[in-house]
Image (cartoon, rainbow, N blue to C red):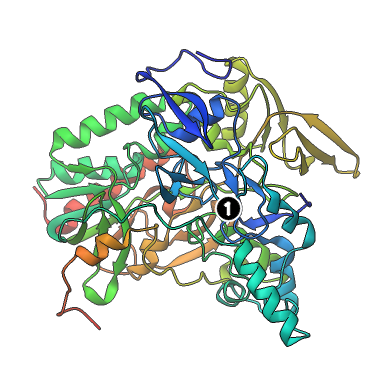
Amino acid sequence: VGERRRPSVERGAPVTISFDGRAVRGFAGEPAAVALLAAGRPLLGRSIKYHRPRGAFCFEGHCGACLVRVDGLPNQRACVEPCREGLALEGQNAFPSAELDALGAVDLAFPGGMDHHTLMTGSHILNAVTRKVVRRLSGLGRVPDRPAPPAAPGEDLAVDVAIVGGGPAGLAAAEACARARLATALFDDQPELGGSLLADLDGGPGRAAAAIAGARAAGAALHPGAVAIGAFADDGGVVAIATADRLVRVRARATIHATGGYPQNRRFADNDRPGVIAARAAARLLVRHGVVPGERVVVVGDQPDALRLAAALAAAGATVAGVDGVRERIVGVEGARAVAGAIVEDARGARRTIPCDAIAIDAPAAPASELWRQQGGAVELRPAAGGFAAVVDADGRGAGPGAWACGDVAGYVGPRAAAAAGARTGAAVARALGGA
Amino acid sequence: VSRKIVVCRCEDVTEADVVHAIERGYGDLEEVKRYTGFGTGPCQGKECHALVASLIAERTDRAPAKVAPFTARPPLQPTSLALLAAADRDDEGAP
């Protein structure tokens, strides 16, 4: 099936997709960015200002690294766009193509960055010209080829418990609430339920299937592809959910925030080069999609997740080098359009380059606490926990009466502990609402 | 390509841009966001918010717990305007 693919997963029918006019083989249903990476093509487009080469990083529909034009629609995430026969992707912000972008020179013109407040402000005329040029050069895609299809009218939904997030914590909470005969609806922004379990090297996809089956059997309504786009504290805590074709206003007696966390990058030169991906993305590629991100992979990090990933990639036949990020740090990347090496530095300042075609960065996932904050929940910046973690008690209770949080959103704990926290919070919510 | 440490990919904001803003006296996330534009792109801070927060804590020598997040405004994910246009108006809600 190809040198980066492994026969470890079931795949859909073979299909042909295209990127900037070139045919690429994929399998029906797998994300387009996965098919492209498996074909050794991590480059997906150019960046908004400097036209730097860009490729997918998180592979879970959260960061903004993999935006492409899909069948004439701009700014679609290639990492969640399913492959089907004839799917046509185009790299954005590039002329003539993402591979050979003539505007990449903008990057060289501003080596340190750009302060647009003082960009050529010495002269009115020069400033006006500069603004005009910059506006032509920068931007995010072109407008769609055709008008959007009409959406269905908005809907209202009232439930006992609304759960946002369909990973280990959310699914466990849903099962506990539904078992207590509470009307329970779970919403997940991804096309496929399971969250971080789908990237868990320890049998995650199987455990995701079991957790989904458990929640469904208990009677919870599970909605994948349902994105919580906002919570409105001044309107009784209503949560707005965007589905593929309509907006749903959800009112619940209790909202459980099981939104997990977002993979994070580290700070090093050219950390945005295509082929630099999150460690969790590499794990997801392996266990969910049967793809190794490269033939030679550098894994950065000294935590158990990073060590497990390095071992799993090696077992899958990749050549793996570990950089612990403590005694030896990654400081840069070789390769103009895609990763060709990792530049690392030891404690004495000695540098060496490790040749590779992928770099997997492990760092604690940043708690996805925006919706929680919108419902009035408190957060605290805890760098070791990944970022702004929801502040809750042992049961997941926050400051407000109807808002609860569990799992990685309260600080990174990983899928097993998140599932336990979800079950605990689900049971506490059932007690609080007087479930059966 | 030039060597840049990118902290916000969506808006091409570099570590140097953030440090420059801090040096100009913008010391919290809300101010640095407004000055550099970090966190205002399609991902709305999912990749950069925590990273820049840690950078600010480091550079301003503040305890992390003293760094407040920026305000997260809806929509939290890119949303088709057609969905919003088709939803009926909620005249009873807050203005």
The residue identified by callout 1 is A93
> Residue at coordinates 38% horizontally, 39% vertically from top-left?
A195
Can I make out residue A402 in this image? no
> Residue at coordinates 31% horizontally, 63% vertically from top-left?
B81
Give left or right: position of B50 versus A115.
left
Q: Position of residue A329 (x, y in %)?
A: 77, 42
Give left or right: position of A124 versus A262.
right
| B93 and B55: which is toward the camera | B93
On what subunit does the disc labeled 1 rest?
Answer: A
Q: Position of residue A17 (x, y in %)?
A: 44, 29
Q: Quadrant of residue A295?
A: top right
| Above/below status of B26 relative to A86 | below
| Above/below status of B32 relative to A393 | below
Three-letter amino acid code of the residue under disc 1: Asn
| Above/below status of A139 relative to B95 | above
Q: Secondary structure at mark 1?
A: loop
Q: Position of residue A188 (x, y in %)?
A: 31, 46
Q: Quadrant of residue A418?
A: top left
> Residue at coordinates 68% horizontally, 57% vertically from top-left?
A50
Give left or right: position of B91 versus A340.
left
Give left or right: position of A96 versus B42.
right
| A360 and A225: which is toward the camera | A225
Q: How many discs mark residues in the rendered view? A: 1
* Mark 1, other Cα within 10 Å: few <14 / some 14–19 / many ≥20: many
Q: Position of residue A213 (x, y in %)?
A: 22, 30
Can I make out residue A186 in this image? yes
| A103 and B3: which is toward the camera | A103
